[in-house]
Amino acid sequence: GAVVSQHPSRVICKSGTSVKIECRSLDFQATTMFWYRQFPKKSLMLMATSNEGSKATYEQGVEKDKFLINHASLTLSTLTVTSAHPEDSSFYICSARVTGGTDTQYFGPGTRLTVL
Amino acid sequence: GENVEQHPSTLSVQEGDSAVIKCTYSDSASNYFPWYKQELGKGPQLIIDIRSNVGEKKDQRIAVTLNKTAKHFSLHITETQPEDSAVYFCAASRYGGSQGNLIFGKGTKLSVKP
């Protein structure tokens, strides 16, 4: 149980285009999902907290107009990187918390974004 | 805010030996401490967690200990196997908080040599 999927697993795009990453909780409902960014050989950096039906809460220094988050259902959150640039290239990982459960976060497999 | 320090950054052990990774935290209100294992190119996988009302928790070859007074917690892996090789992250958060944000340590790269 507690499986989280991400799609796509890898994406390559040109500068200036937008890319959407999906995060799904497959066997549980998740009122709260989290989006992280991870640079090579580094720790996870929380970008934003996504709550179903409301606006996401962004961490300091994360541009909300560049990283659009939508959490329209209890099993799906999306992260859209708008007008992507090479510096946005990174490993993006989502996690989800079981609705009504504990603070345990279950992570997705990650999405490798490369912006040319 | 919370700050989590993790040591060592790299750890190499011989197969069958034990491995210990230590973390300290700064916020005395933190009460939930998970450990994650991350293999190359994959997302973190929860391997064990502990809450502040417990001092130790075991799951087969993995154990976690918590010292609330000293504000540190440790991961112990016994009888290590090559498949234990990965990056391990500790984290801390306040259970019941409105966000429940996890604050991660910088990670420990564990290498188990056959």
Image (cartoon, rainbow, N blue to C red):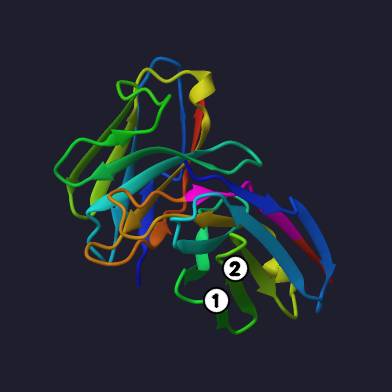
Q: Is residue A55 left or right of residue A22?
A: left
Residue A21, image x, y percentages: 35, 39
Q: Does the image show residue A116?
A: no
Q: Which residues are magenta?
A: B103-110
Residue A100, image x, y percentages: 22, 65
Residue A82 position by quadrant: top left
Quadrant in which the C terminus of chain B appears: bottom right
Does the CB distance between marks 2 and 1 fall below 8 Å? yes
Residue identifier under label 2: B67
Secondary structure beneath dot 1 equals loop
Mark toward the start of the polypeptide (2 vs 1): 1
Q: Is residue A83 above or below residue B48?
A: above
Chain letter for mark 1, please. Answer: B
Indicate yes or no whether the magenta region holds residue B106.
yes
Q: Amino acid at mark 2?
A: Asn
Residue at the image point whose x is 37% and y is 55% from the top = A5
Q: Is residue A64 left or right of residue B7?
A: left
Q: Is residue B102 left or right of residue A51?
A: right
Residue at the far top: name it: A16
Residue at the image point whose x is 49% and y is 25% from the top = A88
Q: Amino acid at mark 1?
A: Gly
Q: Depth check: B60 or B94 in front?
A: B94
Q: Depth check: B108 or B56 in front?
A: B56
Secondary structure beneath dot 2 equals strand
Residue identifier under label 1: B55
| Structural distance between the alpha carbons of marks 2 and 1 | 7 Å
Q: Mark 2 packing: few (<14 Cα in 10 Å), some, or many (20+)? A: some
Mark seen at residue A113 = none
Residue at the image point whose x is 53% and y is 21% from the top = A87
**Marks 2/1 same chain:** yes
